[in-house]
Image: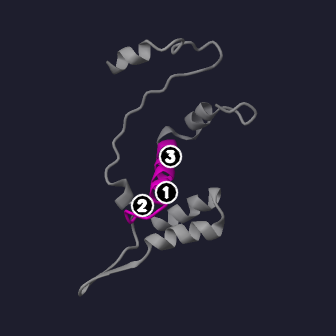
Amino acid sequence: KWCQGINNLTDVWDTSDGQCVVVLESKFENVSQKVDLTLLNRLLRLIVDHNIADYMTAKNNVVINYKDMNHTNSYGLIKGLQFGSFVFQYYSLVLDLLQLGLTRASELAGPPQLPN
């Protein structure tokens, strides 16, 4: 059914203007638990103010106390933070672009004068 849906799109296989069709399937497991906060901070600084990026990563780098147990979270995202979905989607976008590679990602994005 998925292939039929792609084939039913109009002009999906037309490459006369340099278009292309990319189909890629991958499986990332426990991405939110494996986020490196230092790398995340550097990536966030590319798109938001550095104070906001520091705030977003500092909220995930905390000590969690429950009764007599302590846990220092220095790796991974804490679920339930207000901006957690944004951070996760942004990190996933970076992973997707890394998987495609620089050349293919640039082709999909298009030139700066005429982006997709």
**Can you tell which mark lies on residue 70?**
none
Give me the residue at 62% from left, 35% from top: 109
Is residue 87 found left or right of 45 in the rendered image? Answer: left
**How many numbered marks have been drawn onto this rendered protein structure?**
3
Tell me the distance, in whole angstroms, between the alpha carbons under discs 1 and 2: 10 Å
Residue 98 placed where, x, y %? Answer: 50, 45
Tell me the distance, in whole angstroms, between the alpha carbons under discs 2 and 3: 13 Å
**Can you tell which mark lies on residue 87?**
1
Instruction: Estimate how packed mark 3 is, as few (under 14), some (14 to 19) or many (20 or more) residues with alpha carbons within 10 Å.
Output: few
Give me the residue at 58% from left, 32% from top: 108
- The image quadrant where one finds the C terminus is top right
Q: Amino acid at mark 3?
A: Leu
The colour scheme used here is one colour
Report the residue marked by disc 2: 35
Mark 3 residue element:
helix
Residue 57 placed where, x, y %? Answer: 50, 68
Q: Is residue 114 magenta?
A: no
Say which of 28 and 77 sits in front: 77
Rendering quarter of residue 111: top right
**Can you tell which mark lies on residue 93?**
3
Give me the residue at 45% from left, 59% from top: 84
**1 and 2 marks in contact (CB < 8 Å):** yes
Where 53 falls versus 17 (above or below)? below
Q: Earlier in the sequence, mark 3 or mark 1?
A: 1
